[in-house]
Amino acid sequence: MSYEKQETDPKTIRLFYGIDEIFKKAQRKSSYKAASIKKEDGSADFIRVELSSDAKDLMKDYMEEGMLIVFQDLFSILSGESISHDVQFTPTGGTATQVTYADIADNENYRTINLDLIDKKIENAVVDFVLFRWYALKGIDDEAKIHNSEFLANKKDVSNLSLALRQL
């Protein structure tokens, strides 16, 4: 769960995504992919395919771009104005971490499972966007197309699922 209710006036839901967590998920997915893509000698192509640790700063830029695209659609449907990127945030009962977050209106008329699903779809979309941009940068066009398609599908799901949050 990467959200919490803010008891402000008006009430909001803060959707936040840890930079380290997104990076680890994207890196793990790229590692699995690298194990299945073989070089001419039959060995796994980790150097070319896997998201490397030294690319984390670049990944932050991709994460921010992906979040802006997802939330641009969401903000056109729900009340929300801006995204804060790469900032220190301490969730209730948690520890401080670097996150990207956005606040949306909390109409308090939805099932929590809808919010959980939207949260997961946003996270998946951002991971897929990071991998799309990584593979495009590395010239691995087939993988870039796959992750771009996944990103667009998750982004569409976020918009469709947001109906549950629009209920008044």
Image: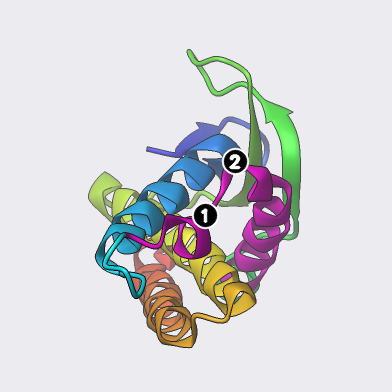
**Location of residue 78 with respect to 6 vertically, above or below:** below
Residue 89 image point, x, y percent: 66, 27
Instruction: Residue at 48% x, 13% y: name it.
Output: 93
Asked whether 95 or 74 is in front, the reply is: 95
Quarter of the C terminus within the rendering? bottom left
Circle 1 residue: 51
* Residue 46 in the image: above or below residue 36: above
Task: Determine crowd level at label 1: few under 14, some 14-19, many 20+ residues with C-alpha closer than 10 A.
Answer: many
Can residue 12 be seen? Answer: no
In reply to whether residue 65 is colored magenta, the answer given is yes
Query: Which residue is labeled 2 in the image?
Result: 19
Whether 118 is drawn above or below 41: the answer is: above
Disc number at residue 32?
A: none
For marks 2 and 1 on the same chain, the one whose residue lies earlier in the sequence:
2
The image shows residue 118 at horizontal and vertical percentages of 37, 58
Which amino acid type is shown beneath numbered disc 1?
Leu
Q: Is residue 125 at least partly visible in the picture?
A: yes
The colour scheme of the drawn protein is: rainbow
Give the magenta-colored segment's residue range. 44-70
Q: Amino acid at mark 2?
A: Ile
Give how far apart the Cα atoms at labels 2 and 1 are: 14 Å
